[in-house]
Amino acid sequence: MSRPKKISMQDIADRLGISKNAVSLALAGKKGVGEQLKAQVRRMAEELGYPLPQEAAAADGAAEAARSAVLVLVPERVMSYEDNEHFLFYHDLIWGLEEKLRARGFSAVILRIGSEMELSLKLPELAETMACRGVILFGIVSEAYAQMVCGRFPAALLFDSFHRSVNAPAVTSANVEGAAAAARYLLACGHRRIGFIGPANLTSSHEERWFGYWLAMQQAKADILPQWLLLESAGFASSPAEIEAFADRLQVAPPALRPTALLCGNDRLALLLLDALERRGLRVPADLSLMGFDGLPQAAAAQPPLATMKVDKLGLCDAVVEWLLLPERQQPAGRARLHWTVPASLHPGGSVAKLEDGSLL
């Protein structure tokens, strides 16, 4: 019985109609031949059973890693909030994203952005050198930092928050529509004096939720009084003190001048206010109805359970993966913005009273 013929570089060259030298350069991953030809040579070598040199195999491995790796840049403050509500919300979102990416063949590389790094507009060291399929900028970062990241990485996506001045695709909750639905729910429960709490100066989500509330109130021709609003904050760490001051104003206001319901830009603010009102003898919902946004487990466990708009965290993660799977030719030419929004769902709770009987009016 004759031995099987040993496959040579010349066999590969003959099959492809190229020179043996071109095959040698391609298999070694050297300059002198194009990337497309290198790929054709490697495929033919595999088909014929020719062993790939270590260099070419390593190059294939690096190329595959670059096709599957996704850098997820996460601000350090997201994972180090002192309040448990913020930590759990973002923790679930980050690891939900990692799981969804893994299920579709991607490898998430999670890199933290320190506060000094953000101020000095520096990337994590690995992000400077690692080839990847895409970059996801997670959560709330400064406008300057978002501009820098999106300028450095053509395949960058803003996730959960965005800046209008940054020309990059984004995936967020449908904040305008969700807050409008929340306000309409309160209106349907008989409330007309509805206030809003949310630092619209700090994040796009609060800005959009404020607009959704305003839109629903305008459409219902319901008044919005300045004393029913808390729209600005000195910073996230200032929220507890600002909520305390707002609760003080509610406590001393005559009942006829108080809002009968308050919509908060997230569950964290609503839970802070719930505690502050109880300590001042104002009962929820007997004296004031309260509603949040996000759908945190702590909202359902509160007494009374907090009415809220639940963010679809898994739906957000699915949208990110779908964006990564877009063929390059379909990705936004010239960085034109695409904005995916994922609907939130209404979760009624015991913190909202119905006013058909005229109470609180």
Image (cartoon, grey):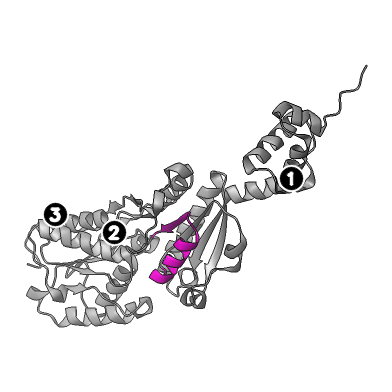
- Residue 25, by quadrant, is top right
Amino acid type, callout 1: Ala
Residue 326 percent coordinates (x, y) = 46, 43
Q: Is residue 361 above or below residue 172?
A: below
Residue depicted at 45% across the width and 45% down the height? 322
- Residue 348, by quadrant, is bottom left
Between marks 2 and 3, how big is the CA–CA gap? Answer: 15 Å
Badge 2 element: strand
Residue depicted at 53% across the width and 49% down the height? 101
Is 146 a magenta residue?
yes
Is 97 a magenta residue?
no
Q: Nearer the viewer, mark 1 or mark 2?
A: 1
Q: Which mark is residue 188?
A: 3
Amino acid type, callout 2: Thr
Tag 3–tag 1 contact (CB < 8 Å)? no
Badge 1 element: helix
Residue topped by disc 2: 308
Q: Residues within 10 Å of mark 1 (few under 14, many from 20)?
A: some
Residue 270 percent coordinates (x, y) = 29, 68
Report the side of 173 relative to 9 (left or right). left
| Extent of the magenta region | 141-160
Q: Which mark is residue 64?
A: none
Between marks 1 and 2, how big is the CA–CA gap? Answer: 55 Å
> Disc 2 or 3, which lies upstream in sequence?
3
Residue topped by disc 1: 56
